[in-house]
Amino acid sequence: MQELFFNETQLAQRWGMSPRTLQRWRIEGRGPRYLKLCKKVAYPIEDVLDFEDRSTHISTSERAAMAAPFGEDLLSAKQVARATNLPYYLFCNPRIRSQLKVPHTKLNTQLRFSLADVQHWADGWRKRWYDAGAPDRFVNSAIPVKATVIFGGRNDKA
């Protein structure tokens, strides 16, 4: 009978690493897909092989070219702020980014932004401000610099 899964120890031995590394990867959302039944963790062999294929590189410079999924051009926080003429802190500050629901993608440990998604998000904010009766100088400006005031401070009970 052919085995369809690796257990944690088998996979760690295959890759020459500690089982704790695989445990940390699961917490961080890295590594191959896994199946957890009760307290047992199993890695489907097909997913392990697929992960290994995606992890192979010809050179270290090849990694940068493979960063954006599906050929989508993703920008850093600084690049998208420059391209949209919006304040940089909207993209780099995690609290403000989550409050304003700024669309972003997380690639490993880096945040990336789709220019089209951010522009669509910004247009939505402009429409909300216009509908709320904000003066034209705010509606036509580069998105709500004071939007965090609307959402309140640390001591607000929401």
Image: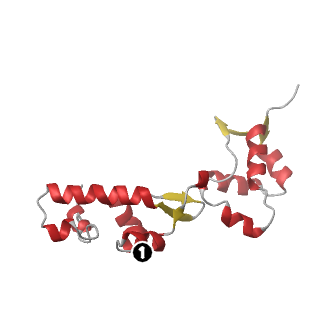
Please, which residue is most extreme toward the right here? 1
* Residue 146 position by quadrant: bottom left
**Helix, strand or loop under label 1:** helix
**Picture coordinates of residue 18 (x, y %)?**
78, 57
The one nearer the camera, 153 or 123, is: 123
Left or right? Give the position of 101 relative to 18: left
Q: Quadrant of the C terminus?
A: bottom left
- Name the colouring of the figure: secondary structure
Is residue 101 visible in the rendered structure shown here? no
Name the residue carrying label 1.
Answer: 82
* Residue 150 position by quadrant: bottom left
The residue that appears at 81% across and 62% down in the rendered structure is 58
Is residue 50 visible in the rendered structure shown here? yes
* Residue 102 position by quadrant: bottom left
The residue that appears at 80% across and 51% down in the rendered structure is 12
- Depicted 124 relative to depicted 1: above or below: below
**Picture coordinates of residue 33 (x, y %)?**
67, 43
The residue that appears at 80% across and 58% down in the rendered structure is 17
Q: Quadrant of the N terminus?
A: top right
Amino acid type shown at disc 1: Arg
The residue that appears at 24% across and 60% down in the rendered structure is 126
**Picture coordinates of residue 131 (x, y %)?**
15, 54
- Give the mark count: 1
